[in-house]
Structures are given as C-alpha cells and as structure tokens.
Image (cartoon, coloured by chain):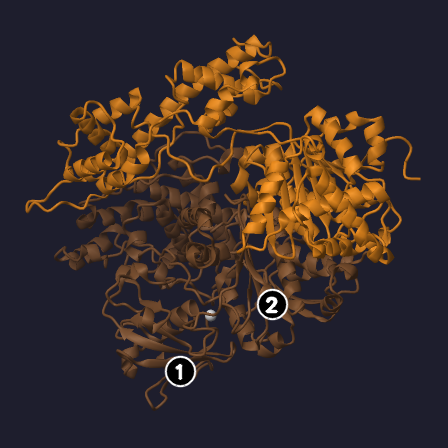
Amino acid sequence: MAATLNGVLENNLAESIIKSRLLMVGAGGIGCELLKNLVLSGFSNIEVIDLDTIDVSNLNRQFLFRKEHVGKSKAQVAKESALKFKADANIVAHHESIFSPEFGLDFFKQFTLVLNALDNRAARNHVNRMCLAADIPLVESGTAGYLGQVTVIKKKLTECYECQPKPTQKTFPGCTIRNTPSEPVHCVVWAKHLFNQLFGEDDPDQDVSPDTEDPELAAEAGQAALSTEAKKDTIGGIERKSTRSWAMETGYDAEKLFNKLFRDDIKYLLSMENLWKKRRAPQPLDFQELPGKGEAMCTGVMRDQRVWSVQECADIFAQSLAALKQDLYSKGDGGTLVWDKDDHNGMDFVCSVANIRAHIFGITLKSKFDIKSIAGNIIPAIATTNAIIAGLIVMETLKILSGNISKCKQVYLNRIPNDRKRLLLPCALDPPNPKCYVCSEKHECTVMLNTQKVTVRVLQDKILKGHLNMIAPDVEIDDGKGTIILSSEEGETEENYDKVLSVFAVGQSSRLKCDDFLQNYSLTINIVHVEKLEEEKEFEVVGDISQFHPTETTTESPVEGHTNGASKSKATEEEDDLLIVEDQVTPDLVSTGRKRPAEDQQDALLIKRKKQESNTEDNEDVIEIS
Amino acid sequence: MRRTKGPVLIVYKMAATLNKGTGLDKNNKYDRQLRLWGDHGQAALESSRVCLINASATGTEILKNLVLPGIGSFTIVDSCKVKGEDVGINFFLTVDSIGKSRAQVATELLSELNEDVAGDFLEEDVDDLLEKNPSFFSTFTTVIATQLPEKTLLHLGKVLWERNIPLIVCRCYGFIGYLRMVIKEHTIVESHPDNTHEDLRLDRPFKGLHEFCDSLDLNSMNKKDHSHTPWLVLLYKYLDIWKNMNGGKIPSTYKEKTALKELIKEGVRRNAEGVPDDEENFEEAIRSVNSSLHATAVPAEIQALFEDPCCLNLNTDSKNFWVMVRALKEFTENEGQGLLPLRGSIPDMTSDSERYIQLQTVYRDQAEIDATAVAGHVHALLHNIGREEPLNPDRTKKPGTLSDSEIRTFCRNAAFLTVLRCRSLEEEYTTETANLEELGQHILEEEEDANSDSDDTVLYILLRAADRFFTEYNRYPSYFDDTLDADIPKLKACLSKLLHDWGLTAGVKDDYVHEICRYGASELHTVAAFMGGVAAQEVIKVVTGQFVPINNTFIYNAQKQTSTTIIL
Ligand SMILES: [Zn+2]
C-alpha cells in the first residue's frame, strides 16, 4: 500500500506531528486509548503523568494493563506496554501527582500541547491554570457510561475549564447525617465517617455522634443541660472521648460498638423530642435481638446483589470490624486506614453499617452492589466510549497542530443518535468569559462568609485550596499596608491559623490578594460579611461581584460546597474517566440556547435529567469526605 | 499460497474457559460495566461467539473493545500476511510479526487482553470460504466484516441474511468512517428507553390498589401520618372524589386537571390559625397530576407487534420473543382487560417506610399475578407448538423454553418491546430497491442546512463511487501514489455513472473527489480507533439484546467531527 499516512495528512502536519512534544495527564481509561492512538498516529515525544496504581476494576477497559500489573504504576506500565509496539518512541512516565511542584511553569512550557485524560475536577482545574499560565493549548475530555465529551482550551481564544460556574454539588448538613437521615445516601455518608473515626484520619467534620447543636433543637428549653446528663448516661457513664480511643479501649468489640452506636446513641437521639414531632422516630437495636436472627447467611455469588437482613448486616459488621482491626494494628502505632471502595472489608463495613442505620431510621435498605455505587461515586465505564473519545481527542489535536485551532470543536457523544440522527454533537468553541476569575485579565471573585467565625485555616484549606483550587496560596490584605495573613512558606504564619478573619480587621468589603506561585496565579477576593448562610455552610463563593445578589437564596448560586478538597489526593483515585460529564457537560448542555439548534434541546434536556438522577447517586460529596 | 491445508481452525487459548473461578473475580473486573447492562447482559455477552473478517486496524480495534468486556469467544478469518504498513497503524500487529499470518498474530495479542475470552483464527480467503463452506458462519452469534470489497461483502451479506446471523460492516477510508448493521430481525426486550411514564394505573386501579387506598382514612389520621401518606394514595383518593363529582370521568383537559389540583390543595391540614401546614406529600401529589393521569393503554408500537405475522403464526421454530409477544396479546385480551401486565414499580416519594413498603408490595403483588398469567399463556403456547411439557412446574431450562425470570423481565418491559428489521445489503445495492428517496432527502437536507457544514451523506456516495472504481479497475483510486492524477477523472466518471443510475441530480464538488483520491483507501489509526468504539458498542447491543442498535448506516466525518445515521 503506497498511500501512507503522509499522503493523507497535509505534509506540514506530518512534520508537526513528529516534532511536537505532548504531555498526557492521566493514564486511565481514556489515557490508555489515547497513548495508543498517539503512538500509532506518529507522535513520538510524549510524557505521561499519573499518580494512580492499577486496580482489578480497571482491566475491563484499560487495555495496556494486565492482571499481573495490578498494584503497579499506571504511567509506568502504560509506557512499557506502548513501547512494545513502537520501541523508538520517546515516552517519559511520571508516577507522580500533577500537583507536585516539579511540574511547574517551566515544565509545562516545554510542550506543544497538553492532553487531559483525567478523572477529577481538582486536577482538571490545576492543569487548566498551568496551561493558561504557560499559554499552551489544552485538550480536555471525559466519559461517563455511554456519554463523553472533548473540548479545546486556549488562552484568550476559548472558554477555560473554569469559565462557567460548575453545578452546585449536593452537600448534606451535619445534623442530617448525624441526627435525622432520610435517604440511603445519608446513612452511607455516616458509615464512611464512622470508618474514618474508627480507622482513618481524624476529621472533626466527620463526627458520628448525635449533634446537640441541631438548629431544630433551639426551641427546646434546657436542652443543653439535659443533653450533658443524657450523654453520661447513655454511654455507660464514660466521659465523652473520641470514638477512636473508646473503640480502641474496647478492643474493637463488635457488640459494645454496636450497642453504643445503634442502641445507646439512638436512645439519646430519641431524647431530643423536637426532632421526632414531625418525623418517624428511629428505633434502637440491640446486638442480641436483631430481625432476621437465625436465618442462614448467604455466601453465594448473589451476596452482593441482594439486600441483607439486619442480622446478616450485624454479622458482616462484626466480621469486617475484626478484619479492619487487624489491618489497623498491622500498621503499627499511629497508623491509619484509608477507605477504598474496592477493598472488600472496607466496603463490607460501610455497607453493613449503612444498612443497619437505614433500618433504624426506616429507610430502604440497599444491596452492596448499590451501596458501592453510592459510597464509591462509581461512574460506569466501558472500553467503547473511551475508544470513541480518544479518537476524537486526536482529531482535535491534529487541527491544533495544523494551525487550525479556530476550527476546533467541542464535541459531545450521545448515548444514541438524537432526533436529528446525530451520535456526535460538534459545537463551536465559546469565547472566554470576560468575568472568569481564572482566565480573564481581572482575577476577582466574591466570597460570602462570617468574618467573626471563619479562621485563616478555613480560608486556606477550604476556600483557597478546597474551593478555589490553589495549591500553595499566600494572602495579604489589600489595606494599603499589605498585611500578610497567610504565607505558603512553612512556619511563617502558623500562629494565625486559628484566628478568625475579623482579628485582622477583615470585614465587609475587605479585599484579599491571594497569590499562588506554583500556578503562577493570583486572585483578589472581595469579602462580603454575612452572619449566617443556609444549611450550615461556612462560606459561599460567587464567581464575580456582579453575580452577587444578596436577596437570592443560596440555591441559585454557583457553589460547590466546602468539601471539595483539592488537596486531598484521594480525589484522583476516583474512576478514571471523568466527572467532566457531571462537571461540565451538564451546564453546557443546559444552556443550549447559546450553541444549539432548537430541535436539539429536548435531547439536551434529556441528558440533563439523567445526570441529575445520577447526581443523587454519585454524589461527589460522598467521596471527597473519604 | 494464501491457503493453509483445508479450513484449519486453531484454538489458541483453550485454557481460558478452565480459568473460571481461579482467575480474577469477575464481579470486580466487570464492575463498571455491570452497572450498564447487568448480570444477565454480561451472561449473554459471555456466551457470544464473534467472527471477525480481516484483522485490519479497524477490525482489531473493534475486537479489542469486545474482548475487554468479555465476549465468549472470537474467531478471526484473514488470509493476509502481516505487512510493514499494517504494523504502523495496527496495535495488535508487531514489527517482528511481519510475514506471519495476520489472523494468527492478531489472535495471539488480542487473547492476552482477557484470559476469560477464547480466541481462534482461520487463515483462509473469505471468498473461498463463502464458496466452499458457507455454513462455517452458522456457528456465530455475530459476524463483523471490515475493509471488504463490494463483491465479497454482498456475497457474505447474502449468506448471513439467509442464516439470520447479524452482520456488522465497518470500514475506515481515510478520514471517513462507515458502519452498516445488517440484521434481518433483532428483538429487544430491554430497550432502556430514556423517557418513560410510570405504570401506576390511577385511571384503571386494580383490586389491590383499591383495597389498600380504601383502607386508609385521611380524616382520622394524626398529623404525622397525614403528612406521610404517599402521594399516590392522595391522588387516588382525590381522584375518587373528583370522579364522583364528575360522573365517573377522569380529568383530561388542562382546566379539569387544574380543578383536581385545587381539590387536593384544599385537603392540606391547617393549624389553629387556619394557615395550611407544610405537607410535602400533598405538594408531590399536585405536581404529579399532569404526569400520572395519562390514560393507561397498550402503546401503538406494541399493538403493531400483536398484529405481526410472527406473533400470529407461531410454529415450532418461533423465537421465544414472539412466543412471549403472543402470550402478552392473549393476556391483554383476557386477564389484562385491554391492558399490559403491570410493571410493578413505583417512584420514590415522601412517606413513612411502612406504608411505602406496603404500597410497593401492592404493586409488586399485582405484577406477580399478571406475570404468572402471562407465564400460563407462554407455557400453553409452547405446548401447542410442541416445545415444552406443560405440567412440570420444576422445569430445568432447555433451549426453546422459557424461565420464569425471563418472563418476568419481559413483562416488566412489555411497553418498551422493540423489533428492529434492517434492510438487506442486496436491497441497498440493487438500484431498483435502493432507498433513493431517503438518500435524496438527506442530501437535500445537508445542502439546505446552511448552519451546519455536514456532508456525511455525500461521503457515503463517494465510498460507493470508490467501490465502483474497485469493481472496474480492481484497485481503489490512487491506491498507488503515482496514479493520483490519472485516477481523479476515472473516479469522477464512476461517480457520475452511479448518480445517473440512481437518477439523482445532486452535484458533488470536485474537492470531494480529490480528497477521496488522496485517501488512497488508507486506514488511519485514529479513525479506526473511533469506529472500533462505535462498532463494538453496536455489537454489544446486538449480543446482549439490550438497547436499540443503529438502523442501519452510520457515517463519520473525522475532519469535521460530524456523523449521521441513515436508513439505506
Ligand atoms: Zn476562564
């Protein structure tokens, strides 16, 4: 066959392919397909970054990995597998976090373009900023089940990844989780919190005991006094201490733990009568007298598919507790466990605990298969969708390399051809949002908070890192004096951490200048002081001051919730192929007026509806807490 | 040279099937896809036998996407030896395999992807195989043909059509991707429709629903119970009142529905000051009036299936699907009193869990009664066509019989049954039967749609012209670089002959002819990878019997990232 690739592609394009240097971030579902496509399209200088290791559940689609690779670095194995087919390709693998300082501006600047094959928003935000700072094109992509999307981001030419506010993520008020669960997901979140309280890293936001500061209790006179009394009573006269140390003292005794969590704590909740005036009251359980007692435990294949009886749950609770205790002790003093949806014991524990709690509160019980979905934020993933999307990515890449970036498209993959018979929906790229606090000239946003309650630590961890996706922020007050309240240099401002912002005279209309040298990014925050936000939120970010309408309730605001912790590396561990459909496809599809013919709208809304459904199941909040 | 001794079928990985249980936990390995098509979809996938013709880049990309999720087995038919240019674009052929059998090398490498999949190959020319041993293809669940010339393709299409074996044709030609589904009849129980009404029967309440709702008295309830009564019950009760006031009629107009909503609103409890309480369940009932009061009826699509000759004329060889459709028809005409079996599920709603579960049970029980009745018809019908002993309740499942769980799944999906009948390749390629109307319509739409620059249908015509070129010159246009200039006018001539035969006046711009010539029938890996995903997805739909496959042609323009589907 004489008609080679060179004949089909324009000559200068073939040359650009050979000369170009690509950075591929992520070597999961899309990454495996993409690396193969790149190598077989003639690209030979490729660097791959992925912190992840290979898991069994990757093997149904991540074809560069085999059974014997489980546990190894994705980046490294992907490189080795690809080199088998093209030994002369120059592939560099980094088994590292993309947030690592070694991948700074100079690192990014060496590439012709960057290809994202990521699975989480935090990393996408970061790469977005790095590419803007380095002024190199970025091809962004994602898949979820049968749906997928590819888009191109170029500074000053297109929208950036953060130009449009992301949809609100559902977060659950602490008192719903601790006192008044009404949906299975509330019990699952509680179960994961319990796991962390017993085995993981301590997080004060993950308390599992009854919450005596529930706003609904406010009316109850003398509640505080009553609760102190009851507290001593219900846990057998033991002074209140951390769940962890108490469990340790009992030697992780299943019966003692069970009776504390599911009998005594529930009795205590019952004493908060205000909660149960309009609700079904929970029913305490005793370890020795459980529904389903005496029934044989099913151990067959169907174990994960059917709903366990309460007795089974208690048995599995005891078994997994014992196994996890062993795991924990094997880590030595001060060791902790990290919850992982693919870990048998961790998953058994969360499933049994969530179901026992669901039973107590009269909530529908679920199978382990379903709970895994909720707890692990599992997004279905298949080889075919990734193959399609990876093909599209390379086509967009070729356009960029042939100097036709203006012809690039944002392409959506439908589940089935739409009413107009289109499986693919190519849309023109939108221009940058002039009010974007990331890619516009003026980097500004507005944050509503109570300056007398929010500490510098919350500002750093939850607002700047968790919400605004900075990695190492410095903050000074724009007060003419340049008072520095936060420094990324270790030890410089530690004494400020627990002080609230008002201590530094930060109040209504204060401006904070925040700077992240790692991202080459700076941002001015306009503070709006509010006494109280809905649903116990500590703060709320409004992208632009003009979007700030104090009369509207928070439901309208583009808020992600404060649990989105970019600094928690656990986020990268989620299913390879994206969240972008959740993150990005949805809002874009919703605003069809901008870019789609009217007849496509129904189709778009359909997808929106579906996504909303799955949102309630795959709640990001659930993972981020892990 | 191209033939080995006789049709040798070498089983490459026999060990695979023995590996079950000792290998990886399949539930873990397939976890992310089980969430799309379920255990039974996976079981169907695992029992499928797929044949691939030609281990081209397109072919191996398709197979890769089928081996990974775990089809039962595959067989590659290919008489070619690996050449240098294959290696550059095909991930499953390596440099050191040049000169070896393409079928064998690809089989070996693809088999490595999943130890639970058995792979084998046949180094044999397809034309010869079709000539000498056409029944070879009878053993497959699905056949995938890639990069085949028109003559061979039509022959293959005929052989498979006669045997009722689904054929999926896939082809990558430069920046063009082409897919054609050729399935005589494909029946789908689980079509997974996007937008469906719940099957609640509020307009035609069944006995259990009557009894349950009538047993509840809203007036005597305490505050908590009142505000936790499921909206379904509320709607039932207020509908009852409304019917009594309106001569037994169900509200159908906007005005009537608004009146019903007002009626429900008045039922909200008030506090001592006369202010209405916050009763979420009443709000839900009001919100549900529009969506829940549609008339329950057998959908037109299902009515059409009832009148289908396959349903009316059952015989020993009838598909299980048609036996069940017939049983459904008989149920509808008898026990069902004009309705399909109840689906048996209810949506989430505000309720205490006790009454929610009771309500769930009411629906589930009726669904069970209906499904049992349908099963009765199924077994009687099977007996009539001589396929089953009727009086043995403890049947072990035999081919041609039906299990209770199959019948239940069928009943749950009774409103969404879909039958796909594609046109044959012969019909498409014979001028008299070609769907020229559809083709002309598509071209017109593309020309008139000034907003979109889609030209996918033109690409189809160009592919057909290139095929005609092949028939005349025994090579594709510009297959050899040095013939580019000479081939352009020749291809133009083929194109105008084709359009003339079809009686189409559409003008195809010269640019397209040049472009097609420039492609020289080459396969680009990226296009092959894309089409590999699309085609494998269609194979999975066919094999699992879930989701509705594309009918019948899909065209992808990689340069513009556009695509279309068209019935040809
Ligand atoms: Zn932006």
Q: Horizontal and vertical percent for residue B289? A: 27, 36
- CA–CA distance in space, label 2 to label 1: 45 Å
Report whether the residue tagged 2 is closer than 8 Å to ligand 1. Answer: no
Asked if B132 appears above or below A514 in the picture, the reply is above
Identify by letter the chain in orange: B
Q: Horizontal and vertical percent for residue B189? A: 52, 29
Looking at the rendered structure, the kind of residue marked 1 is: Thr
Q: Quadrant of residue B276?
A: top left
Q: Secondary structure at mark 2?
A: helix
- Circles 2 and 1 on the same subunit: yes
N-terminal of the two: label 2 or label 1? 2
Q: Secondary structure at mark 1?
A: loop
Is A429 situated left or right of B197 in this image? right
Is B267 situated left or right of B42 in this image? left
Q: Chain of mark 1?
A: A
The residue that disc 1 covers is: A493
The residue that disc 2 covers is: A405
Number of labels in the image equals 2
Quick check: can you spot residue A205?
A: yes
Q: Horizontal and vertical percent for residue B528? A: 70, 50
Looking at the rendered structure, the kind of residue marked 2 is: Ile
Q: Quadrant of residue A96?
A: bottom right
Closer to the camera, B26 or B336?
B336
The residue lying furthest to the right in this view is B1
Quarter of the image with the N terminus of chain B is top right
